[in-house]
Image (cartoon, rainbow, N blue to C red):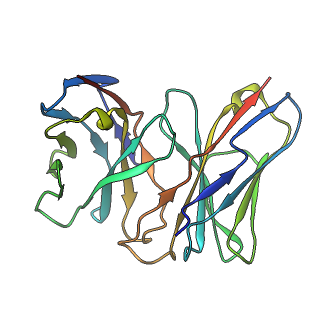
Amino acid sequence: DAGVTQSPTHLIKTRGQQVTLRCSPKSGHDTVSWYQQALGQGPQFIFQYYEEEERQRGNFPDRFSGHQFPNYSSELNVNALLLGDSALYLCASSLGLALAKNIQYFGAGTRLSVL
Amino acid sequence: AQTVTQSQPEMSVQEAETVTLSCTYDTSESDYYLFWYKQPPSRQMILVIRQEAYKQQNATENRFSVNFQKAAKSFSLKISDSQLGDAAMYFCAYRRGRQGGSEKLVFGKGTKLTVNP
């Protein structure tokens, strides 16, 4: 049973560029959430996708956007990269929106460095 | 807005000993869940233990147990018989209950646990 997989593992970009990060949820899961974890901090919620729609959004600018595909995989896009976007980006998957006992399973993340 | 506070940036414990990690949270909700996640150097967040707010009984998972004090909004993690593999960052997290399992998680800043042989 494949867990949550993220690609790429590491990424180096320069300021002003655009980046796309990818996530495949755990088998059987249909909901994907994205988190940003700055160095020495806990993860912060960016947004969540369910049924190919953004369902919840954290306090992140519009430069952060996403997409969910029919196979439940997801992409996180960041435009006009800033130095402060350097972080570990974590993807978490879960099943459905209303099952209270479900938990979120995390991938190993993508380390983004903006120079 | 809900907040989670972990006041111990770093903790250390001798192998086979017991250590307790602290966490406090702030919420006006009555229905919520609390979690402890472990993040080893491999970076993947691994769920250690979960507590439903409506349950008075403290959750336990093998060597891991929690002390959930709802009135004090405190949620500490006790690791018994510590092992070298327990060394990691530990994050306390909160989630509202009413939106279900996919509701966003709110994390603390983490506690780095070192296990000394």
Compared to residue B90, the image places residue A4 above or below, namely below
**Horizontal arrangement in the rendering, residue A25 relative to residue A10 (left or right):** left
Is B110 in front, or is B61? B61
- Residue B35: x and y in percent read 32, 53
**Horizontal arrangement in the rendering, residue B70 relative to residue A111 (left or right):** left
Is B43 in front, or is B91? B43
Asked whether residue B55 appears in the rendered view, the answer is yes
Compared to residue B48, the image places residue A9 above or below, namely above
**Horizontal arrangement in the rendering, residue B11 relative to residue A108 (left or right):** left
- Residue A55: x and y in percent read 62, 68
**Horizontal arrangement in the rendering, residue A22 relative to residue A43 (left or right):** right
Q: Which residue occupies 32% across, 62% down?
A: B32
Asked whether residue B28 appears in the rendered view, the answer is no
Using the rendered view, name the quadrant where residue A5 is placed. Answer: bottom right
Q: Which residue occupies 56% across, 65% down?
A: A2
- Residue B38: x and y in percent read 38, 43
Q: Which residue occupies 70% across, 28% down?
A: A84
- Residue B114: x and y in percent read 30, 25
Compared to residue A51, the image places residue B24 above or below, namely above
Compared to residue A87, the image places residue A108 above or below, namely below
Q: How many marks?
A: 0
Residue projecting furthest to the front: B117
